[in-house]
Amino acid sequence: MTVPSFRFSRPVVVVVVLLLQVLLIPPPTEGSPDKCRLVRSLRDEIAGYRPIVDRVLSYVQDQKGYKGRTWTALSDFTDTFGSRMAGTQNLENSIDYMLNRLRTSDLDNVHAERVVFTGWQRRKEYATLVSPRVKNLAILGLGGSVSTPPEGIRAEVVVVNSFDDLFNKSSQVSGKIVVYNQPYVSYGKTVVYRSMGASVASKYGAVATLIRSITPFSLNTPHTGHQSYSDGVKKIPTACITVEDAELLNRMYNRGSKLEIFLKMDSKFFANATSRNTIAEIKGSTDPDKVVLVSGHLDSWDVGQGAMDDGGGAFISWNSLVVLKNLGLRPKRTIRCLLWTAEEEGYIGAFAYLKAHKSELEKFNLVIESDEGTFQPYGIAFHGSETSACIMAEVAKLFDSINATAMLSSKDNVGSDIEVFENMNIPGLSLLNRNEKYFWYHHTEADTMTVEDPDSLDLNTAMFAVISYIIADLSVELPKS
Amino acid sequence: MTVPSFRFSRPVVVVVVLLLQVLLIPPPTEGSPDKCRLVRSLRDEIAGYRPIVDRVLSYVQDQKGYKGRTWTALSDFTDTFGSRMAGTQNLENSIDYMLNRLRTSDLDNVHAERVVFTGWQRRKEYATLVSPRVKNLAILGLGGSVSTPPEGIRAEVVVVNSFDDLFNKSSQVSGKIVVYNQPYVSYGKTVVYRSMGASVASKYGAVATLIRSITPFSLNTPHTGHQSYSDGVKKIPTACITVEDAELLNRMYNRGSKLEIFLKMDSKFFANATSRNTIAEIKGSTDPDKVVLVSGHLDSWDVGQGAMDDGGGAFISWNSLVVLKNLGLRPKRTIRCLLWTAEEEGYIGAFAYLKAHKSELEKFNLVIESDEGTFQPYGIAFHGSETSACIMAEVAKLFDSINATAMLSSKDNVGSDIEVFENMNIPGLSLLNRNEKYFWYHHTEADTMTVEDPDSLDLNTAMFAVISYIIADLSVELPKS
């Protein structure tokens, strides 16, 4: 499968859906591998890292050590730059700032690698219920949405609660605005309405779609996110509305009211937008060409400050290297920190990196990512061979002092950007963390530093430091299936 | 104390603060009266109402009875009218609608009583952090705030975390915008920053105040609410900002950044605004001039739909009469439903009613109100004499089948509008309900039907019906202290 065709295709969405469903919603029901028969010497070797685990955990929880410094760095960064949408000068400025921070942290091989893509920019947008009464609707246009005509669209509304419901009402949809009021089941199960809602409704002749935001809870909070048009259907404007407004419109529609909405959206596409993946390393002492990759994405949506998605993930990643550096811990293999760009537009930075580094991939031992929140960690989510999972289960045991020994061995990918590498048979890892409220904030104005907790960031940083150190230092590599 | 001087004075605010502190935040620690020595015959008499309790509870939980009808009525109402700010034609239209509904419910003595006041209307308002970077701030001007000059105000910012902090920084405040970033302790303890913040900062020469919204939780959610200027200080524009922005500005300020904000607010005052209290009754069978009053307010702020504050309270009040009417339950004394107007501007409807009905007050046995949410009820909050509290404790026991037997005998008032009557030595009652999240929605765009639960509305309606029926029917009146 070539990279460009894969980038925006339905399989990506489906994989993301499945991935998020596994990762973010349920408790780790798949459980830890219970049939592990690792050789005693390997188990002993892993247990032998306990002094390092203790040292790292002490360091990040010590006022005179690194305590609170991930939070401070993250708040300095997000407060200075705010949202960092791919294609904006603001993101590029924030990347320059990061490169400078990585260099002054004395990390190795600090550099950026160029990424080219088609950018999308939100401009003006608003929606008003004009009949039977006038009410402004809080909306956020979805990434990649086309604009309305300059004069806007005024049209009657059909409210549906599912794709089946839309199918049943399909004869009424032509020329109308379709409002999706699908109930929230889980992000993984429900996000398909955001991803595909416009194209499905367009098939039946809808002129626009307004989609209930993908969240279990709202304070009149519209969410944004990526969407992709299917081939062969007319591209129609599409935005998310709030849970509250979706329910209101649904009630009114079910009472038989004739609803009319005025919608005006204006966005801009620009070809050959550029951005950069940001890279730093701790060079391995004996096998510098072998790699454990630890990552998060620096870009964000254009609402909120991207503190949670994915400032926290990016900052625990590079700070895990800083912690190791500060403690003089250099493993045998290289730990490479990747701060992806343009993740929100469809893993664009990760695909570009894969393409540019394909020949190197066989030397990747493990890809680590945080992109599902940096709340209190409680364990490890892992995707890889059975024996690899057994090794990770031994590593997880080392986090007993912070109650983070849960081990989820997942059949599905456990990351977003790193799924690109997981699909190349490289083991993947992310942290299990108390992210039950993740989707309350996701892609909204509420994604700010208020979400982030200094102590949790410390623990996440420590876990990434320890995990990447151990896997980069072990006598064996994680066996690929 | 004359009514007009009382209406907007500091004592009112203090009383409200104390009241809300008692009512809304802590669990009922004051406990139920445990030294009750009611005569056996009275206890038996109250227990004798159990068949009526069961009948009412069955009726509101029966699909063929009244089940879900309070919710349906409330959603029809709020969806049709939306927000209902005092002084707007929309509120007056909604009052006409209510009068019609009360008449078609076959209640007695349905009418409205005129109320005159000075109205306030929000027009345009916005705030932008202009330095060190540009960021729009979500704001809601506070009720009664003056406008900025037409060209707006651009000024440097001083961030404070308390009145003490402001006092310490008072020499730096002249000509600046004061941002209050006070932590949320409880609504009762924290709301004083919203009520008084502008006047306190104005004393030191501030040109405007932006106040962290009074809530324990936010999704970038600005709140509004009433505020009053102290005598003798210059009136300066004042608005609430979000928790997130207050924390952001605080962090930036503490780093030593010179912050500048541009603020533009435009509001309108209009003298001789009119509105109406809405009234309906079940006339007492033997003592029609004696009254149990059950109430909520129909007006709301101009954001959200006022479904929670106080659509729910108003609707359980009048529906409790409808339930009694439908079941043919007419007590000895009159049950009077009052749907107050202009509560949000400072109990204006209640004060007007008090003034017009002063001679009648001695015949008021009990004033009941719901203005703290209609979530799942779990008992009774009561303010009155010890013996009255003992009577109410016996009534509370009748709600064992729905786990709503908690009895809080409060030294402080237990209502908002009804405090006006409680202060005249009339016993007051409200329901204890699971309103832990009340202030998440309070005075925001998120106060919509999504907050309301049909089953909880049913139970609240039933409890109001039973309580008002029993007290209006008992052989004795609630003894006043």
Image (spheres, coloured by chain):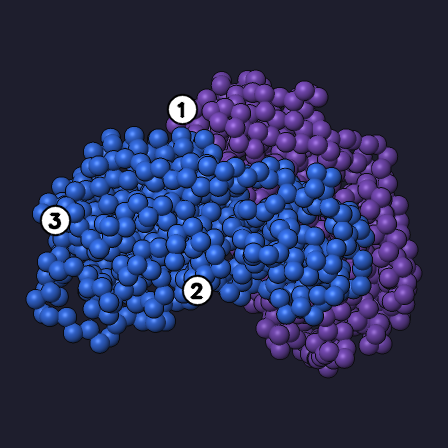
Chain colours: A blue, B purple
Q: What is the distance, in whole Å, between disc 1 and disc 2 at their CAs?
A: 46 Å
Q: Secondary structure at mark 1?
A: loop
Q: Amino acid at mark 3?
A: Asp
Give x and y (percent) for residue A327.
16, 42
Query: Could you say whether the residue bearing mark 2 is in a helix, strand or loop?
Result: helix
Q: Residue at x 50, y 24 (%)?
A: B131
C-alpha distance separating marks 1 and 3: 46 Å
Judging by the rendered image, the residue that carries numbered circle 3 is A287
| Image position of A324 with respect to B28: above or below | above
Residue A147 at what x, y percent from top left? 64, 43
Question: Could you tell me which chain the residue with mark 1 belongs to?
Answer: B
Side of B260 relative to A377 (left or right) = right
Q: Which residue is mark 2?
A: A18
Q: Which residue is labeled 1 in the image?
A: B256
Q: Quadrant of the N terminus of chain B?
A: top right
Residue in the image at 53% along x and 41% along y: A120
Real-space Cα distance between discs 2 and 3?
35 Å
Where is residue B332 drawn, in percent x and y?
Answer: 85, 71
